[in-house]
Amino acid sequence: MTPAELSESLFALIQQLGDRRRQSGSETVLDLTPSDVTLERPRNRDHGDWSSSIAMKIAKPLGSTPRDIAAQLAEGLEALPDVASVEVAGPGFINIRLEAAAAGALARTIVEAGPLYGTGHIYDGIRINLEFVSANPTGPIHMGGVRWAAVGDSLARVLKAEGADVTREYYFNDHGSQIDRFARSVLAAYLGESTPEDGYGGAYIGDIADQVVAKFDGEIGSLARDEQQEVFRSIGVDLMFTEIKEKLHGFGVDFDVYFHEDSLHESGAVNRAIERLREQGHIFESDGAIWLRTTTFGDDRDRVIIRSNGEPAYISGDLGYYLDKRERGFDQNLIMLGADHHGYVGRMMAMVEAFGDVPGVNLQILIGQMVNLLKGGEPVRMSKRAGTIVTLDDLVDAVGVDAGRYSLVRSSSDSQLDIDLDLLGKRTNENPVFYVQYAHARTQSVARNAVAAGVDRSAFAPELLTHDSESALLGVLQEYPRVVAQAAELREPHRIARYIEEVAGYYHRWYDNCRVIPLGDEPVSDLHRTRLWLNDATGQVLRNGLGLLGVSAPERM
RNA sequence: GCCCCCGUAGCUCAGUGGAUAGAGCAGCGGCCUUCUAAUCCGCUUGUCGUAGGUUCGAUUCCUACCGGGGGCACCA
């Protein structure tokens, strides 16, 4: 019996209570849907396999006390075939214990579902565009961007697991004055001049200059200065694109679409967007500039979209870009941004509304807090211009892809993340990823040894899984689909990480208590065979969970 | 001044209305001739920032304040 079936039964019982009350002449309004009748897995195992607090919520409309309602519902639940016992506790909690066979059946269900266990249908048929990282092509990917790479990719996997048709998208800001600064910086390095005042000063700038010279088909020295700068711009930006893509690929993150801001300006998409908004009456001119009246939609000020010198302001790219995504037919557009960009949210949502769409539905902006770098406990300020940056490579070199991704995706994006550079290299076994991976490797090791010892899955007798550590393990395995669904709806992949850590803990404890392989001369029994199912089911859940995080599930460690 | 995030054990953090608030790390003490000791078991620590409010019930929701971080351009 699944929790869904159990809560349906509970809902039906509640309806009966209401009906009985109405028949006896009382005015009873029970505004309840099946989804209101939730079951929780109690923290305290003594409280049973499942628990419901519904009696406290419906006591008032039913004109009775919570404990009385709970007692009536308990009686009905007890009559269900898979329910072993029901008790009423505290102010009116209903604690339900299932028959071992009913709970244990899950092991087989998981093994047979395989990689599909935990997937759902929340976003079946929904097209979602997920834009993340989108770091400017003026330098290597640094730690700020890497967090979104890990979290964004994992979120994409989670949304897919719930049926969404997900497009991972990277927006390259290859237009505007920052690119000019980048080009002038590389040119200066080539000419042996000092870094321009507003330019980028990192050591990588010199490397790029060398690479551009090697790549350019011709003699750069013979060109005029503005022609040289153009060469360094176009080839230099291309080099950065290539490097960024390669590094992300090495981190297990690949995008379906790399979108170039430049293309919006070239294709006229920006102008089309402005025209559209002008027709809607949201455009005005002032001080020689062209503005979008975002205050109509709650922004704190109106925004310049074409500057008085004729250059498009940054937001004009966003207008064209949003319109483009819209025309590509996405039902939901998600953008992940760092906290230093949270000021965009108001104007972006205003823009969405100006186009006639619904903010928060057609466009959702996920703000993640910054990564703090520490060195020996002291904060290190990252700056591309000063050249003090810590890159994706530095992280991977220090701890590897798995531990790196895991440590970034493990905490909520709402929290700032501290990464101590000195600790990265040394205390890697502090990373819980190894705890989880070890648990998975252990399931595989047990499965291998089981074959050698003559234990196979030829029998499945779930009623034999009666040990406390077995019902606890089964209880947590059962939660996996709900965890995935919640991670998808809340856009919080860290929940997957926390969950598989919990699974690993229950597994290790079970391993310590319950043997899959007979000890000594003991004959192979159905209990051993059934435990092998549970072992394999746990391995499957750990594998599925790690897969959603983009972390490998090793066969042995 | 306005906006966003955070404040929970010594440290790093989980916990979007439920029962006695949890985990890892750190500390102390136990288990390896038997499926992997990167495991497991035991001990120890809390004004859930403060004050009100809503609720049968608040770490969770609302308000104010305090503390930390980030943001408030015709820059991107």
Image (cartoon, rainbow, N blue to C red):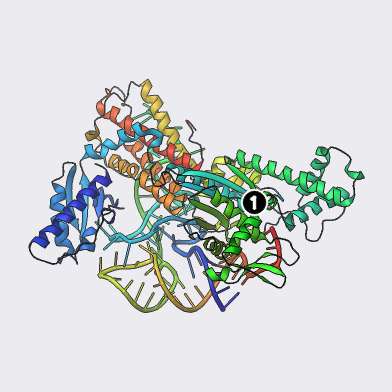
Front residue (pair A348, B69) = A348
Residue A495 visible in the picture: yes
Residue A535 located left or right of residue A183: left
In-image side of A516 versus A288 (left or right): left
Q: Is residue A101 left or right of residue A330?
A: left
Query: Which residue is outermost to the front?
Result: A279
Q: Chain of mark 1?
A: A
Residue drawn at x 42%, y 45% is: A501
Q: Which residue appears at 35% of the width and 32% of the height?
A: A111
Percent of width and height locating residue A356: 51, 61
**The image quarter in which residue A505 lies:** top left
Tell whether B17 sits left or right of A488: left
Residue at image position (70%, 57%) is A383
Residue A490 percent across, percent down from the top left? 43, 54
At label 1, the amino acid type is Ala
Q: Which residue is mark 1?
A: A135
Q: Residues within 10 Å of mark 1 (few under 14, many from 20)?
A: some
Residue in the foreground of this view, choosing between A484 and A424: A484
Say which quarter of the image contains residue A288.
bottom right
Q: Position of residue A241 (x, y in %)?
A: 69, 44
Is label 1 in a helix, a strand or a loop? loop
Pick the quarter of the image with the N terminus of chain A.
top left
